Amino acid sequence: MNLRSVLFAVAIAGWICASAVGQTSGKVVKVRAAEPVYKVKSGSAVEAAVVIDIDHGYHINSNRPAESFLIPTSLKLQRVAGLTVARVVYPKAKLQKFTFSEKPMSVFEGKAVLRFNARALSSLAAGNHALKGKLTVQACNDQQCLRPQTIDVEIPFEVTK
């Protein structure tokens, strides 16, 4: 093997490693509101949801991971004047054993739906509004964990009087 071939092989290996290191959880985790628009009458409440779609072969830690050093899935919703939001309810996690862990891990796979109630106070003007939030996740497969990422979430509401 000549020097050029060795340098080429080293360059390709470095590029592949850099690609894997640079991949973030947002590449395999997609987030959306469960409905295109939540309609709510002023003074009433509606159950809203955020759907997390996780690519096949990957999982994310639950909101209560089995180990304290693991990054939990967490949805933080911003305050909107005139809209009250109840605590986010996370789905039941799956306990799963992986080759890299000594004990089962608490994870979400496939699709996870986070639910919460939102109430439109009478002080909230009729019309279109958006509840914004930040979802923090860390996706892993059987061999590696990707860099954690915080993903912007927007849940649209239409308030009627």
Image: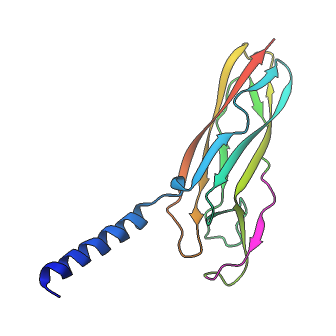
- Visible residue check, residue 87: no
Residue at 73% x, 34% y is 35
Up the image or down, 59 lies above or below 104; here it is above
Q: Nearer the viewer, residue 19 or 48?
A: 19
Which part of the image, by quadrant, shows the N terminus? bottom left
In the depicted structure, whether residue 75 falls above or below residue 5: above
Is 98 in the magenta?
yes
Task: Farthest residue to the left: give it.
Answer: 3
x 24%, y 72%: residue: 11
Comparing 1 with 74, the one in front is 1
Q: Nearer the viewer, residue 51 or 8?
A: 8
The kind of secondary structure the magenta stretch mainly shows is: loop
Side of 144 relative to 89 (left or right): left
| Location of residue 92 (image quadrant) | bottom right
The residue stretch that appears in magenta: 90-99
Most extreme residue toward the front, as rendered? 1
Q: Is residue 69 visible?
A: yes
Residue located at (70% from left, 14% from top)? 127
Residue 154 higher or lower than 150, as above or below: above
| Residue 117: in magenta span | no
In which image quadrant can residue 140 be found? Answer: bottom right
Where is residue 119 drawn, in percent x and y?
81, 28
In the rendering, at what x and y percent does residue 22 appear?
A: 40, 61
Give the position of the C terminus as an image quadrant.
top right
Residue visible at 18% across and 80% down?
5
Q: Residue furthest bottom?
A: 1
> In this view of the protein, which residue sits in the foreground, 4 or 52?
4
In the image, is 151 to the left or to the right of 81? left
What percent of the width, then of the height, locates residue 68? 66, 70
Spot occupied by residue 143 in the image (x, y as percentages of width and height): 54, 76
